[in-house]
Amino acid sequence: MNTNVLGVINLIHESDEMESLTAGRCTASVPFGSRYRLIDFVLSGMVNSGITKVAVFAHTKFRSLMDHLGSGKHWDLNHRQGGLFVLPPVTDDINEVRRGDLFHFFQNRDYFTRSSLDYVVITRSHMVCNIDFEPVLAQHKASGADITVVCKHQTELFGGMARKVEVDGKGRVTAMQDHYGRMQSNLVSMEMYIMRKDLLLELVETSLAQGQDHLVRHAIMTRLDELHVQSYIYSGYLGIVNTISSYYQNNMQLLRPDVYRSLFFEPGALYTKVKDEPPARYAEGAMTSNSLIANGCVIEGTVVNSILFRGVHVRKGAVIRNSIVMQNGIIGENSRIDHVILDKDVRIVQERDIRGTALSPFLAVKRKVI
Amino acid sequence: MGRKEMIAMLLAGGEGKRLGVLTKDLAKPAVHYGGKYRIIDFTLSNCAHSGIDTVGVLTQYQPLVLNGYLGIGSPWGLDRRDGGMSILPPFMKQKGSMWYKGTANAIYQNMGFIDRFDPEYVLIISGDHIYKMDYDHMLQEHKRSGADVTISGIQVDYKEAKRFGIMHIDDDKRITSFEEKPKIPTSNLASMGIYIFSWPVLQQYLIRDEASRLSGNDFGKDIIPAMLQDGVSLHAYLFEGYWKDVGTIESLWEANMDLLTDRPALNLNDRDWRIYSVNPNRPGHFVAPNAVLSNSLVTEGCMVEGTVHRSVLFYGVQAGADSVIEQSVIMPNVRIGQGARIYKAIIGEGAIIADGITIGHPDNGSITVIGSDEYVTRNQTLLEVKQP
């Protein structure tokens, strides 16, 4: 069933502390988990929840994101009506690109006003999870809250940055703080907000009129007294990926079978751009253990505790440990890598030895030859 | 509708009797192969890479799975405004309805479809074979030779030759004789069942063939011999490369094993000739700490905790701890229990093999086949389970 909810994936001023991984791409299109881009998780969640109209508020470095999303057909979002909308900044003045999300929502207000749907869910792209928004909407309606924010009890953030949330005995949000605040709370915001579309448009207009242009920091955090902001507790797997450390550690979490099963299969499937790679091929003498391997890989060497994206070639005698190798990487004969993140199309020639550490993995930029 | 130079008619109604339980509920072109494909993916991908944008797919036997799989042809780039993929089942006419009596009759009954595109040439292919071929290259040769018909041929073993249509050719590759499934083959040039016809010539022969009460309405048995007899010019296009008819359990198993060599004759990793298929949307496969994998193909969505050697695992296969899979083909979503042993077997889609069960023999016996959705426990098949 199609739900009465408009989807918004808000990439405006997304946190961006992933060094060279986001040098040429936005956070939303950072490759993650052997074959996905970060945006696939929340986008698949929306689709699986019956949301059929989704706007991606693109902001900067979105070339690879556009390439990834295409017409939206891989997410079943190429509809006669609705479907996927990628909305880049609308402005003549380059300085206005830097303004907050409310400004950009205002510039694209036609997207909201033209739709007959009553609710809107606004998310970001860096929350790795498998979420069903239907129960969130149901709770939102039942509670009578103005805004429902999806939260999770999580103490170990693996270096990710998140907003802390405090709630009262009934789950009403009483305080929120940016990630650098000192609030002692194990409740973190997943930056997913459901509200009536009318309320969003009202917040956009009144906030902008008061010289404020950030949805969460201004429109919501300063109005916790007047607005009823309710928490919804998500209990599935959550990885907050917005720093190199959290990128590495959350990838490694996928090697836990319980995480693999819950993130990738429950409650819905995850969709991504199809590449038509053949199955992975293991040659005679290949050794693989505790790893996540995508299609198109050819493994002639050894792979331990690692994540290989599509089309990676591990040549004879090569040893990969504790590493993440993105699409089309080549590890030359007898080369060894340990605690390394290789961006797309990196080639390690033969007989190399490259090591990082768990806290500071070695990071190779896209297309580098080592 | 604009005129098309060449359209393809893909015969996909094959029953695949000799594949036994594997074709109980689906047509042969829909049989799984190579870890993530169905056999028909190869011909459809060939069409896509050869620039053919109009394909009629003729279905008859058990079409449900195939129809669902093909959809509107999007995975092969065949969801087009003009042309694209059309599924052509037998249909009712004013004078009653008729099944497709033979390969030629199937095309005869769809002459109206072909005429809508007013093509110069018609490519006839079947969805039963695994190979990569550029049909445009074949068309160029057809045009250069000036022939009315071009038949693609491949050298086969003399031992195998009696299974095919066998041709003799002269120095200019003109076909001088054609015999369908000869008892004593005098040549080893086999027809691959891939024909390019100049459409007006084919149309004339289809009408004549239909009028003949004695005809079996088959390309190899009737149409081609009639053309040869009349002196129509037939040309052979010689194909070199991997080509496999997976008509039997043995050949299906072999074709899967062919992919496991160091440099497979059929290269699935060719970036310039990808084989397109419907994507099952699964994450990368998970290899557990104690798993051992060698000489195998493993597809996304698998969870491997046991030992896999010389085998093909389709998507979503779960192989439990201490299980052993050797020389086997494990179709999608099969669950293999802890400590189970599978030797030289083909396990059908969705089957469940209980803990500790042994299937087949480690000392290379014949191939064991377990049907789809079967539940194997204590060395016997007790009941069928349905996929969720």
Image (cartoon, rainbow, N blue to C red):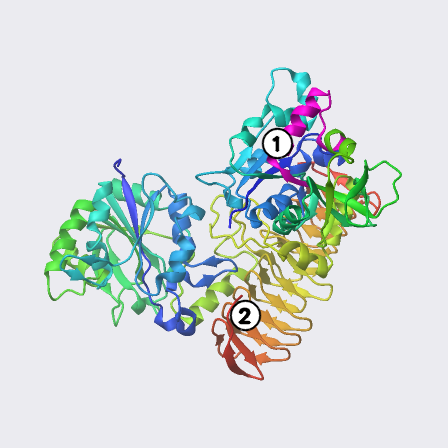
Asked whether the beta carbons under mark 2 and mark 1 sit within 8 Å of each other, the answer is: no
Question: What are the residue bounds of the magenta stretch?
Answer: A193-217
Q: Position of residue A257 (x, y in %)?
A: 71, 61
Q: Image quadrant of residue A356? A: top right
Image point (78%, 45%), residue name: A188
Q: Which residue is mark 1?
A: A57
Image point (81%, 50%), residue name: A169
Q: Amino acid at mark 2?
A: Ser
Report whether residue A161 is seen. no
> Residue A218 in magenta?
no
- Front one among B161 and A115: A115
In the depicted structure, whether residue A200 falls above or below residue A5: above
- Please identify, in this view, whether the residue under mark 2 or under mark 1 is nearer the observer: 1
The disc numbered 1 marks a residue on which chain? A
Image point (71%, 60%), residue name: A258
Q: Image quadrant of residue A43? A: top right
- Is circle 2 on the same chain as circle 1? no
Disc 2 from disc 1: Cα separation: 48 Å
Q: Which mark is residue B328?
A: 2
In the depicted structure, whether residue B156 falls above or below residue A333: below
Q: In screen coordinates, is A73 left or right of A242?
A: left
